[in-house]
Amino acid sequence: MAKTDGFLVDVDYESNSLGDSVISGFFRTPDGLEQFFFPEFKPYLFAASLNSNALEAIREKKFGPDGFSVLKIEETKKSGKTLMKLFFKSTKELVIARDELRNMGISIFEFDIPFGKRFLVDHPIEPYCEFDIEFIEEAGKKNMVSFKPKKEQHVFAPKMAAIDIETYSPGRFPTPQKDAILMICTALRDKSIVYTTHQKGSGLPGTKVFATEKEMLSGFFSDLREMDLDVLITYNGDSFDMPYLTERAKLFGLKADFGFDGSEIQLKRKGLENAAKLKGVQHVDAYQTISLLSRFGAVSLVKKDLESVVAELFGYAKKKVPPAKINEIWDSGNGFEELVMYNREDAEYTLRIILEYYPMLLELSKIVRFSLFDVCRSSASQIVEGLLLIKSQEESAFVPNKPDESEVHQRLLQSVIGGYVKEPVPGLHENIAVLDFRSLYPSIIVSHNISPDTYKGIAPKGTKGKNISPEGDWFAEDREGFFVSIVSSLLTLRSKYKKEYQKIDKKDPKARLMFGRQWALKIILNSFYGTMGFASFRWYSRECARAVTAFARHYIQDVNAEAEKDGFQALYTDTDSAFLKIPRDKTHENVREFVKKVNAKLPESMELELENFYRRGIFVTKKDPKGGAAKKRYALIDYNNNLKIVGFEYVRRDWSTIAKRTQKDVIEALLKEGDPQKSVAIVREAIRRLKEGKVPKKELVVLTQIKRKLNKYDSIGPHVAAATKAVARGREIEVGSVIGFVITKGNGKSISEKAELEEYVKEGNYDADYYISHQVVPAVIRILNELGYSEQDLLEGGKQSKLF
DNA sequence: TAATTCGCTAGACCGA
DNA sequence: TCGGTCTAGCGAA
């Protein structure tokens, strides 16, 4: 028996010569990346308790065309019920057997958990932890005997590199069958290398020049293998770089073989998306990661192309070389260094994005026991599901099946009422306090023991108890719910991490790791409520979701009622926050006392926090005057002159910069300086510039996402019209892409007819009337209405303010 | 196929 | 040409 130690970096499975599915773990040991096999671990599923006849029938059953049998059957208990654990020799056989078992009328469970994930769920191990390993080597294969977490753990510091390719694209989207790879860049933390076949590259620092593309690819592949990476990063490599490299390699009789032991890239489909997997090496697609983060609201991005992301995250305006320019440079050789720079920056920034989020990804990986490859491509439901699977395994709890289509349909018919939103008091207000509940939904789950396994039904009228929601849903008090123990430990862990982070010096490299840790927990906590009400979720529970929001509405409305009782004015409320106007006879200290008083009555895990005090704030009426004041839009300024603009056009990407900037300037003049006349002057100036035709195109662009195929739209809005026209010109527009359009002078009747993709519009070609009356004026008019101005005042001028 | 509901607004669409 | 209704997108929480 031999010994070593190392970090677990991936779990995978493969078919051996006998057709058995065998799990292997990849460990980063002192000898490099090593693969250890776990031949004892077999694929399995559960079947409902069977009588002896049925059990015999399964034992005798010959499955599939080849007539295989169940490997073995064990009896187990889950949540107190008896289940049969059926083992198979391979995942292939399990898949065949599950259909036939169902046809036999047998209820089966946990039949759709990927084998690699199954292994990680079943073993009390975290990926990227350090282990002491004992193994036996036979016929060149290392079989694991035991592996135990080391007492002292080091943080896994992976070898990382990012790659990016540039291709030839003569006026169309590049196709690997025809268009060459011109350049490839590999970026490491301390250097980057550009591979190219252009002779202009020779002599340039950090470049490797090859005579042919075939030699370049082969050189690039062998360099990658030599780097012996743990993590390989791309930007949209799942859909572009990896398939492209694979295809080009194939054309030259090569293989994109830079995975473990010279294995090739495997291109998979994950739902509708592509995924490129490498054995033993984690392919982290930064584009997928950014999508994940923006889904979870961890970053807010207007567009997800590399340039926009780099601008948002690092404040750097990276220069883009458009495809046509790439070809021009390539053909002429002029400006070659610019192309090299572009390629290099793309790879370097791709690496930087992942370095930025690595601590958070790593923590997510550990919590749900997904590899980095899986975690960066996961959805919210997969992450929560992963966590619940682990918990179920630990407690031998029953795992519900995913619902079938008709069940999902049924669930969708009944939705759950959400948070309470109070109509604000419109107008300009002074001296406001904003209070909010910390982690409201998770803390309600914990406080009232909300979980499917503690649900007792609707409480009879008159029943008293702390776990009866305002709508009557009743949860047990004598035992802790399955969801509750998870959420509660996540909440505790997060506040511990947050405290540690607050204490540590922010320059300490550990600080980023700690921040990432608490952030990962926040993401999971925030998704928990949502998944309970998600129709396709295994642990869907309408009752739980309904109780959470009912309690939430109760608590926030209670804060308002108490505040009014104490002499504050409840200005506005949205779900977990209350805006209070502090009357003249009250102080900030009175607000703090009020918060304390509320907290004294709240359950232990709930807390109302003082978010901030604001000097001034404005709420406006809706466009439809009958509709009253607008919810979810307001602006505040605190005592340090920090402006907070929420919900207004200013924060929306589907409004032009000219409208957004004018709106922001107006709000600022009003809140910061209290100067309505200046606000009016700002609007008039914008209108004047528009009329003179001097506004540059980039201030006029409206960004919108194309969410479906262009022919699937019932209503042809400006963005669809602009996209359709662009496609007619030969531009490719993918579903999900964000396009920018401008309303031109054109001679169409409708706005759509005048909408054109930004790239086809000349400077100065814009419809000034449209931008005045459909962009600038609507963005500011409701704000100025509150101060007594009308639209006429903006367009003509002269009249003075009556208010303020 | 991949967390929820609440809410605002624009612009097309449609019939009088 | 109008006003109501519907489709669509995005943001707040």
Image (cartoon, coloured by chain):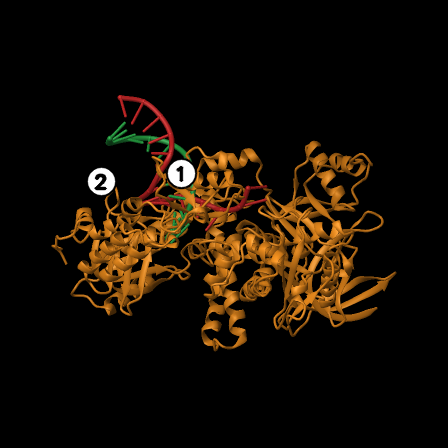
Chain colours: A orange, B red, C green
Whole-percent x and y of residue A24?
A: 75, 57
Q: Are marks 2 and 1 on the same chain?
A: yes
Label 1 Cα neighbours within 10 Å, binned few <14 / some 14-19 / many ≥20: some
- The one of A635 and C2 positioned closer to us in this rendering: C2
Give percent across and percent down for residue A142: 81, 62
Horizontal side, residue A446 vs residue A356: left or right: left
Q: Specify the quadrant that holds the N terminus of chain A.
A: bottom right
Q: Position of residue A242 (x, y in %)?
A: 66, 53
Q: Indicate the position of residue A745 as horizontal and vertical percent values.
A: 34, 43
Using the image as rendered, state which of residue A737 and residue A301 is in the foreground. A737
Query: Amino acid under label 1?
Result: Gly
Q: From mark 2 to mark 1, how far is it between C-alphas?
A: 26 Å
Between A146 and A297, the one nearer to me in the picture: A297
Quarter of the C terminus of chain A within the rendering: bottom left
Tally of marks: 2
Q: Which residue is mark 1?
A: A717
Identify the residue position indicated by label 2 in the image: A626
